[in-house]
């Protein structure tokens, strides 16, 4: 999609991203750019086994290396009470293995040397004797009575069970299913995938021996949460810890938690008295950092014979890896998966989720989605397509018949989510119009009759996402409420500085948040600096993930700007010698009611606020304010997607020919940034549907340790996106925005998979698991007669 940039000096609208001026010139500052005097380098020794007892570790040869300054093992950390660290899900994770290793790539030892090459060379000199143990790779195997117990470090642990969690009304759902005319069921695996950010994870730690202050430059999406966790782990006073998160080359949820390498860099600095840098390579990132998905799902959908959906019920087995390190609110061990009822008006729903340990890397992050909603949307949208298949009904017609209507909002779902606003039928209608849906079906019919060329498939998905995690009454992480802070100061010359607790990984925060202030105060975005990513310079907050930046930090920005505006009103009233009640606001100035020529601009007011102007008693000067924004509810962006694919009959190769996406994220602060976010999410959806999968063999060996094995979508796999929009502002958000960053990833995989299976419909293929590689598609077509009765007519 081509757009024309138009600079909007005051507020919302298209403008070039402010941060791009440095990025396109190569002047971004990343963690690996940090170089301090006397800095040493660290490297991690990782386990070659998925499950093995550590018999012994001999580090003497490595310690004798002339460039090695320290070798740290789990035994070293036990002496410092740092061998284990808390995860974001109230579990603990080994920093360096002490008793046994629990996944291939687990951290075993840490070498600190003069340079990174010497540190990595010295890893080969460490002799570790392992006693191999049988691994548990399949989540279903993990619950069998004779399965090897992975977490023997937990007193009394005799199995691999983590939790059971449910939502909805099981009895009511069973009643609905009992009277349904049609029940469609499907087993689905949303396989383990990896966020794979462009920049891998790393840290530079410096414990100043004079001041006792620890400074950590690190690749984190949540600097303040990291500082609190470092304080808990290391026992340092929080004010003696500074976390700096400079420019980040992508996060996608991968950089929310704390990794052992971060802690080891800190310990290395404490032990050596020097700054220590640790940066992982690509294989380490893919093998050991947080994954996403890995949900085994059994779904059932009940309906009447004419296609009225009555209920949905689901059972999920969630593979959490060797430690429960999922990054999601405490009360939601399965994330927001209970949004699985989707966008449909149904009578009852129920889900049950069981979490288990396996011999894989821990994680379960919100990879380009709000917590586990991608899995939920994939489940319900596949079920709706399976139901359409069983009923012989067009999937668009089935969806339109069951979508929630505007008059039903605010709508409380059957699992307790209060959807704020929306016009779902309008979004689907617009997507169908943009795609030329009727014409596409006619083309598909002609191809089916002729039998020439590739198979053609048309896939639809509709989604509702819950974003803006923040209401403290419902959500916390490790007891920390998810409200966000903001501080705004307008200098005497009328320029402003906004300090935020959220952290950008490429979403354009420095532009978007400047535009919010500009909209509220009438200051040009070019005159507003946005500061983030430094705990010494910003207010407390839990960071950026789950599409919460605009709904929560954006809300905080709007509120704090309005507080500054109200303070400016008092100053202006003193300047104009009238009561504040006699003033009216227009963007950029306060003026006297009935006398528009008598007014003061925000710049004039800012200068006067620092002068000898006599203000009312109890009113301080300066134009600044602070805010901690606790949103009353989540916001619920939604959208309709239509994907058109061609499938080669001989090879199974899938080509995405067209992709139409209509999104509703409420008010669009900067449409260019929104469109860029959608483009990225759609590409990720194609990747997950067709190529991305973290595979393991039966011994627990990781088979996706490079981009030769873990395939990522490129421009060759992506069509020219066709975007549309509807606008339904959120009543819960100060500026009406709903958040959009990850919604495209939520909605797009199901559309691609539905399109491929639609193409395979004449072969009687009802379902296939992601990723739909050419080999998988080809196998699905084999030994199946071409059934003309299943072709679209």
Image (cartoon, rainbow, N blue to C red):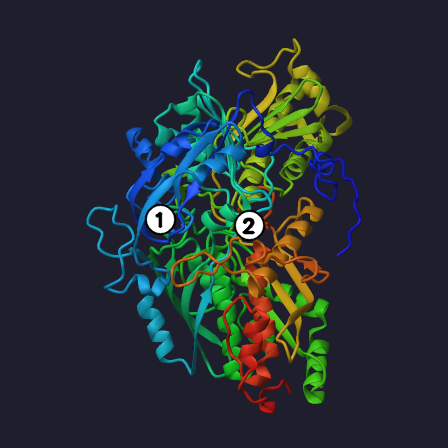
Q: Is 439 left, or right, of 509 in this rendering?
A: right
For the image, the number of numbered tags is: 2
Callout 1 crowding tier (Cα within 10 Å): few <14, some 14–19, many ≥20:
many
Image coords of residue 492 (percent x, y): 68, 17
Q: In this view of the protein, which residue sits in the foreground, 749 or 340?
A: 749
At 64% from the left and 48% from the top, the residue drawn is 667
Relative to 515, is 782 above or below? below
Image coords of residue 757 (percent x, y): 57, 76
The N terminus - image quarter: bottom right
Image coords of residue 511 (percent x, y): 67, 37
Q: Which residue is mark 2?
A: 196
Q: In this view of the protein, which residue sits in the foreground, 353 or 576?
A: 353
At 60% from the left and 47% from the top, the residue drawn is 737
Image coords of residue 762 (percent x, y): 59, 85
Q: Which residue is mark 1?
A: 323
Callout 2 crowding tier (Cα within 10 Å): few <14, some 14–19, many ≥20:
many
Rounded to the nearest angstrom, the CA distance separating label 1 from label 2 is: 20 Å
Q: In this view of the protein, which residue sits in the foreground, 73 or 480?
A: 73
The disc, 1 or 2, on the residue closer to the chain's N-terminal end is 2
At 27% from the left and 61% from the top, the residue drawn is 147
Relative to 380, is 634 above or below? above
- Quarter assignment of residue 660: bottom right
One can see residue 475 in this view: yes
């Amino acid at each position: 999609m081509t757009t024309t940039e138009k600079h909007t000096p005051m507020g919302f609208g298209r403008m070039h991203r402010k941060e791009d001026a440095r990025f396109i010139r190569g002047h971004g500052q990343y963690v690996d750019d940090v170089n301090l005097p006397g800095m040493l380098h660290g490297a991690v020794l990782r386990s070659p086994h998925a499950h093995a007892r550590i018999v012994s570790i001999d580090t003497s040869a490595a310690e004798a290396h002339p460039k090695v300054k320290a070798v740290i093992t789990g035994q070293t950390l036990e002496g410092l009470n740092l061998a284990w660290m808390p995860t974001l899900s109230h579990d603990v994770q080994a920093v360096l293995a002490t008793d046994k290793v629990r996944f291939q790539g687990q951290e075993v030892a840490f070498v600190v040397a003069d340079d990174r090459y010497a540190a990595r060379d010295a890893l080969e000199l460490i002799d570790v004797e392992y006693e191999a143990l049988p691994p548990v790779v399949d989540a279903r195997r993990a619950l069998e009575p004779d399965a090897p117990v992975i977490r023997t470090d937990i007193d009394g642990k005799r199995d691999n069970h983590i939790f059971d969690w449910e939502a909805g009304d099981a009895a009511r759902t069973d009643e609905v299913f009992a009277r349904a005319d049609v029940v469609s069921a499907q087993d689905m695996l949303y396989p383990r995938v990896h966020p794979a950010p462009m920049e891998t994870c790393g840290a530079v730690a410096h414990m100043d021996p004079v001041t006792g202050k620890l400074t950590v430059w690190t690749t984190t999406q949540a600097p303040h949460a990291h500082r609190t966790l470092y304080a808990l782990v290391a026992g340092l006073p929080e004010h003696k810890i500074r976390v700096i998160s400079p420019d980040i080359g992508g996060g996608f949820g991968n950089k929310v938690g704390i990794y052992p390498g971060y802690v080891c860099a800190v310990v290395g600095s404490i032990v050596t008295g020097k700054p220590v840098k640790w940066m992982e390579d690509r294989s380490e990132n893919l093998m050991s950092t947080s994954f996403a998905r890995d949900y085994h799902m059994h779904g059932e959908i009940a309906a009447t014979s004419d296609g009225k959906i009555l209920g949905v019920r689901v059972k999920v087995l969630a593979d959490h890896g060797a430690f429960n390190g999922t990054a999601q609110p405490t009360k939601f061990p399965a994330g927001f998966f209970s949004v699985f009822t989707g966008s449909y008006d149904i009578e009852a729903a129920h889900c049950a989720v069981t979490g288990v340990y396996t011999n894989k890397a821990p994680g379960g992050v919100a990879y380009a989605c709000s917590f586990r909603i991608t899995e939920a949307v994939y489940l319900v949208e596949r079920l709706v397509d399976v139901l359409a298949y069983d009923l012989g009904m067009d999937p668009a017609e089935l969806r339109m018949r069951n979508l929630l209507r505007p008059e039903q909002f605010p709508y409380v779902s059957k699992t307790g989510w209060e959807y704020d606003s929306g016009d779902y039928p309008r979004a689907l209608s617009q997507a169908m119009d943009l795609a030329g849906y009727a014409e596409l079906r006619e083309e598909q019919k002609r191809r089916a009759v002729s039998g020439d060329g590739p198979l053609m498939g048309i896939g639809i998905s509709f989604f509702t996402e819950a974003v803006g995690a923040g209401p403290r009454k419902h959500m916390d992480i490790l007891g920390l409420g998810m409200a966000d802070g903001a501080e705004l100061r307008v200098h005497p010359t009328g320029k402003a500085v906004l300090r935020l607790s959220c952290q950008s990984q490429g979403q354009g925060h420095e532009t978007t948040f400047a535009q919010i202030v500009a909209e509220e105060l009438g200051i040009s975005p070019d005159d507003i600096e946005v500061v983030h990513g430094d705990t010494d310079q910003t207010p407390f907050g839990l960071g950026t993930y789950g599409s919460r930046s605009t709904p929560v930090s954006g809300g905080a920005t709007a509120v704090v700007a309005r507080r500054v505006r109200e303070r400016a009103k008092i100053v202006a009233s003193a300047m104009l010698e009238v009561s504040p009640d006699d003033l009216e606001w227009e963007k950029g100035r306060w003026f006297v009611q009935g006398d528009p020529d008598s007014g003061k601009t925000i710049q004039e007011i800012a200068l006067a606020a620092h002068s000898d102007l006599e203000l009312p008693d109890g009113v301080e000067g300066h134009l600044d304010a602070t805010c901690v924004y606790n949103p009353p509810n989540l916001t619920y962006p939604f959208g309709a997607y239509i994907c058109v694919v061609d499938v080669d009959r001989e090879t199974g190769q899938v080509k995405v020919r067209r992709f139409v996406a209509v999104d509703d994220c409420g008010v669009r602060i900067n449409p260019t940034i929104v469109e860029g976010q959608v483009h990225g999410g759609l590409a990720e959806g194609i990747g997950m549907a067709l190529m991305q999968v973290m595979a393991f063999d039966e011994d627990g060996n990781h088979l996706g340790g490079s981009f030769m094995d873990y395939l990522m979508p490129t421009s060759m796999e992506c069509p020219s996106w066709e975007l549309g929009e509807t606008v339904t502002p959120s009543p819960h958000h100060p500026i009406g925005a709903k958040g959009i960053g990850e919604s495209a990833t939520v909605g797009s995989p199901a559309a691609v998979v539905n399109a491929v299976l639609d193409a395979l419909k004449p072969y009687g293929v009802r379902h296939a698991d992601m990723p739909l590689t050419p080999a998988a598609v080809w196998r699905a077509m084999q030994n199946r007669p071409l059934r003309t009765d299943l072709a679209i007519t």
